[in-house]
Amino acid sequence: MQILDRKNCLLCGASSDQDLCESCDIHLPQLPDNHCPVCLWPVSTANICGACLSKPPAYTRTIAALPYSFPVDALIQSLKYQTNLAIAPILANLLIKQLKTLKLLPDIIIPMPLHPIRLRERGFNQAMEISRYVSAQMGITLLPDSCSRIKHTPPQTGLPWKTRQKNIRKAFSCKMDLSGKHVALVDDVMTTGATLNELAKVLRQQGAYEISNWVIARTLPEKDQANSFTLK
């Protein structure tokens, strides 16, 4: 008889054969049913939002595993600020669940790069850790050193939209020829999308014809955050 390895649920501590027990998994917050396919902002119908229509971003679409609310935010913060690297594949698996429905996969994965100063401070790049697992599980080529962050900027958290755009401007460099490539940009959290958009602009200049944002969590307006706790 095969004996399954038992472990404890990361969230509630209950005995489970998975990282998250069935109860915690089905109670995770979900994105609103109707959202903009480009930026995931909640809309009344599943159409492109006014902001993306009036000023289309450099990326083509965004796919997120979950909204950035409890307990997802706590898991991401534990990975980033407590060096809990074991959480990276757990978060990656939540994203992979959403990606399995894709009919056409990208050619390559590029993780959001960190500036060398920030990388030394943190000791690792959380986007790289997530990307490495997604790449291995989905069989998509990972290009970890194709882009670099050449401008050391203050954290985007708490900055207004226009300030975020200015803060991140000309922060990235990419010298790789991406002509005709569909690129997946991987990051942990998408808030305003300013950082992802700035990197996507650089990838467009290098010839990328399609750019998908793959993120673990998307920040939502407060009222939608509350609604996202509705059970499946």
Image (cartoon, helix red, strand yellow):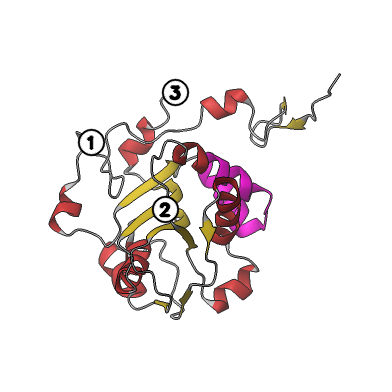
Badge nearest the viewer, 2 or 1: 2
Q: Which residue is mark 1?
A: 46
Q: Is residue 9 above or below residue 133?
A: above
Would you place residue 181 above or below residue 98 in this image?
below
Question: Which residue sits at x=51%, y=75%?
Answer: 115
Distance between the alpha carbons at the discs numbered 2 and 3: 31 Å
Element carrying mark 1: loop
Q: Amino acid at mark 3?
A: Leu
On screen, residue 172 versus residue 58, left or right, reads right
Asked if residue 227 is among those painted magenta in the image, a careful observer would answer no
Say which residue appears at 35% left-offset and 31% top-offset.
Answer: 227
- Secondary element at tag 2: loop
Give, as a three-letter code, the residue at label 2.
Pro
What is the span of residues highlighted in magenta in the rendered image?
71-94
Q: Residue at x 47, y 57 (%)?
A: 187
What mark, if any, has residue 231 been given in the picture? Answer: 3
Residue nearest the observer in this picture, 134 or 92: 134
Q: Main secondary structure of the magenta part?
A: helix
Image quarter of the N terminus: top right
The mark closer to the camera, 1 or 3, is 1
Q: CA distance from mark 2 to mark 1?
A: 23 Å
